[in-house]
Image (cartoon, grey):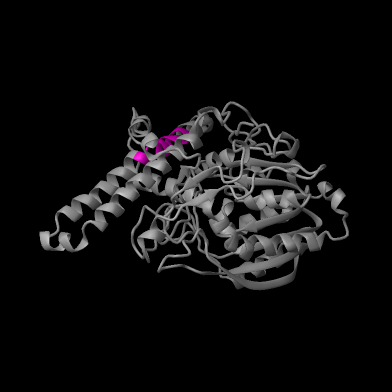
Amino acid sequence: MPVEPQSATSSQPDAAPATTSTNNDAQEKLHYTKVLNAYQNYLSHSLASHRKRKRDFSSLPARHRAILSPKWEEKWDLINTCIRVNGAFIEHLIAGQEDMMDFDSVDHEVAATHDDHHAAHSHASHDNNRDSHTAAVSDHSHTHADNGHSHADNGHSHDHAAANATSSHAHKQGQNKTKSSESDMDKVRSTIRQFVRDWSDEGKAERDAVYTPMIQALCKAFEHVPVSQRGAVSVLVPGAGLGRLAFDVAKEGFSCQGNEFSFYMLIASNFVLNRLYSNYQYTIYPWVHSLSNSTSATNQLAPVRIPDVLPGGIPEGADFSMVAGDFVEVYSEPDQLGSWNAILTCFFLDTAHNIVHYIEVISGLLAPGGIWINCGPLLYHFEGMPGEVSLELSLEEVMSVIKQYGFDIIEEKFLPSTYASNVNSMLRYQYNNSFFVAIKHKPQE
């Protein structure tokens, strides 16, 4: 099922439409090409960065090199191999995705995964131990990751020898491509490391800390609805990333639609939701791009196998789809008003330029009695960015605004979690997430 920008062919017929001008379509297509180009440059860029390490090692005094040899060279060779395996994975990830987005279509829906068919923020702060709010206006791909914009690069697991992922892959990925910026490459690493959080055994602890309480709250809110009838309950997940939370909601029998703005995420989610055919199909090496705060070479080179579950098995009567596009633009259409029974926002609210606008749209989308479940921090993505509007409210202020938009808060607490974190790192950022459950009791006055 191909993915399309703010439009597509999804299993959910009432997906959000969004009209764009010809000029906007051209700009979107240009940006999409830029994102694909960044993926294609992963291998050459990563190998070049890794070669610098060897040059730096060679510049050391001979007596220092003698102390570190030969183990340092052996580690360098292993990292080099891991990068090449990641590069081979990325080739599989982007293969055939040039035509994923239909920029000439009007209703922009994306990467739908339906049981019967088988199944911008780049919020990466703290890259290399420094805080950095990095965002491109046209690609919300913020992660809340420890290592900033790195999400995990993947290698192939079908016993593809490293030699098979060397010269031919390096040639293909670098051939006739425009050089990508460091920011773009950060987003590639970041997006791919997201596979660890969403689709690996290693990410289960993070999912259990955040996704599980949200899904439990959703099931509790609709416990009066028989599981066989949950397909009539419509659930929206904005900022869906690689789609695991939305998929897990659909697995519970609800009709769920994810929404995502970042092309980096959309390309990766289309791959994992629509193009995999077995559990643990690929092996990736997500931690080889930065050697800081590493406890051991073994942990640095730890493989991660994905996916831990194969997307599919959606209960009969439930729909699962993803829609591409800006949340406010896509879901402000008149036919969306009052059409959703539940909205789950996870690490999403702080991606707003104007968080009040997000709250306003969420209030408009929910039918009276609808439920809003949130879990995430307030690490505002556009704070301090030149030329970008950014409204930063405290949690207390946010909750006050939510109440003014017709919500009753029925549960509120803090839930600690990390985000796309390396469990073996000497530096891990922990978020004290705001978790709340709110019910829309009346229209805005």
| Image quarter of residue 415 | bottom right
- For residue 347, say whether it is visible: no
| Image quarter of residue 434 | bottom right
Question: Which residue occupies the foreground of this view, 253 or 69?
Answer: 69
Residue 315, relative to residue 91: is it above or below?
A: below
Image quarter in which the N terminus is found:
top right
In the image, residue 98 lies at what x, y percent? 50, 29
Q: Residue at x 55, y 55 (%)?
A: 197
- For residue 97, say whether it is visible: yes
**Residue bounds of the magenta highlight:** 31-43
| Image quarter of residue 318 | top right
In the image, residue 327 lies at what x, y percent? 62, 47
Residue 84, relative to residue 406: is it above or below?
A: above
Query: Relative to 119, is 267 on the left or the right?
Result: left
Query: Relative to 260, is 50 on the left or the right?
Result: left
Q: Magenta stretch mostly in which secondary structure?
A: helix
